[in-house]
């Protein structure tokens, strides 16, 4: 395993950790907090870049007591500050509330990625309204499942196919980067399989990860890069799950079958079908 990452506030920049106890709810503090729009009640997500791309200018860092949020000007605020909602609303230009509990029936907007590519991040484009966490434990802020994995080989292959060269892992927001040689997009073949990482942690791959507009956006100092989506769209348009429509994919979603502690450097084993 080449890297372990978490994102303490949904759609903000995250942080690397050396080791973690992974439970059915994923990594500790991963998407533990999110912003909710005061008027619509929807969860803020950079999947709708016209409204929420500024989230990716903020970084979030978890501590045992609170989450430290750092905006571009470096004037940090804490999730426990009395005025945190007001300050975040000012930074984002939208009225928001920072919360650790999803609203009942929580929804978010996902802009049509092909339209974002054609018309740009400021243009009005089609938006699908979706529910959070179709394959995640109740009360979490995950888009779909509690863990997202991608291989370093896939990242290298996207970079090889991009006219801009190497692509930064931050654009794809994985929890686990599986290090090693091999062909890009090999994760496609993991669908329905179990993976063991380290001595105990066992995951079940339940979907290939369809990519939205987020990889194309500026991430902190990383500039906008439309090829981060164009390459998977051209070279890995596959079914996320059986009998679904093909979409640009990179990486896979997984659920936790058996919790366990993992650390960077742990070995990943692809288990035989059926366990």
Image (cartoon, rainbow, N blue to C red):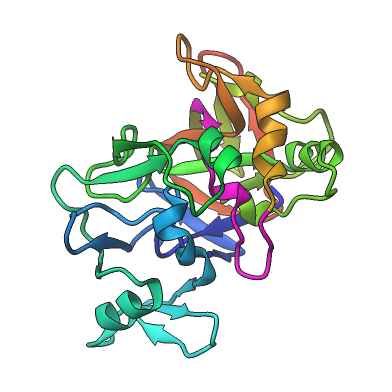
Taking the image as shown, residue 62 lies to the left or right of residue 4, namely: left
Residue drawn at (81%, 28%), measured in percent from left and top? 183
Looking at the image, which is closer to me, 224 or 190? 224
Taking the image as shown, residue 155 lies to the left or right of residue 90, namely: right
- Note whether 196 is above or below 175 in the view shown: above
Residue 162 at what x, y percent from top left? 81, 41
- Note whether 46 is above or below 208 in the view shown: below
Q: In this picture, which residue range is highlighted in magenta?
A: 206-224
Residue 242 at what x, y percent from top left? 48, 12
Q: Can residue 35 be seen in this view?
A: yes
Residue 26 at what x, y percent from top left? 42, 49
- Quadrant in the rendering for residue 102: bottom left
Looking at the image, which is closer to me, 175 or 263? 175
- Note whether 209 is above or below 13 in the view shown: above
- Quadrant in the rendering for residue 252: top right
Residue drawn at (34%, 44%), measured in percent from left and top? 109
Residue 165 part of the magenta-drawn span: no
Taking the image as shown, residue 82 lies to the left or right of residue 111, namely: left
Residue drawn at (48%, 34%), measured in percent from left and top? 254
Q: Can residue 30 be seen in this view?
A: no
Residue 182 at what x, y percent from top left? 83, 30
- Quadrant in the rendering for residue 213: top right
């Amino acid at each position: 395993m080449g890297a372990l990452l978490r994102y303490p506030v949904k759609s903000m920049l995250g942080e690397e950790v050396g080791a973690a106890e992974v439970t059915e709810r994923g990594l500790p503090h991963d998407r533990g907090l999110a912003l909710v729009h005061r008027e619509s009640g929807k969860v803020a997500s950079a999947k709708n870049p016209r409204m929420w791309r500024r989230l990716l200018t903020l970084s979030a860092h978890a501590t045992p007591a609170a989450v430290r949020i750092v905006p571009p000007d470096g004037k940090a605020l804490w999730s426990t500050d009395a005025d945190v909602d007001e300050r975040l609303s000012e930074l984002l230009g939208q009225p928001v509330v920072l919360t650790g509990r999803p609203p009942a029936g929580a929804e978010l907007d996902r802009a049509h990625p092909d339209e974002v590519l054609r018309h740009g991040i400021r243009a009005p484009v089609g938006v699908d309204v979706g529910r959070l966490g179709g394959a995640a434990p109740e009360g979490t802020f995950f888009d779909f499942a509690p863990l997202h994995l991608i291989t370093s080989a896939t990242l290298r292959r996207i970079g090889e196919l991009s006219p801009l060269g190497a692509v930064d892992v931050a654009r794809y927001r994985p929890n686990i980067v599986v290090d090693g040689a091999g062909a890009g997009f090999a994760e496609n073949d993991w669908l329905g399989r179990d993976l063991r990482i380290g001595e105990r942690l066992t995951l079940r791959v339940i979907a290939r990860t369809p990519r939205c507009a987020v990889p194309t956006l500026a991430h902190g100092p990383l500039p906008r890069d439309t090829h981060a989506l164009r390459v998977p769209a051209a070279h890995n348009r596959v079914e996320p799950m059986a009998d679904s429509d093909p979409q640009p994919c990179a990486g896979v979603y997984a659920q936790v079958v058996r919790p366990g502690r993992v650390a960077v450097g742990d070995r990943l084993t692809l288990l035989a079908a059926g366990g």
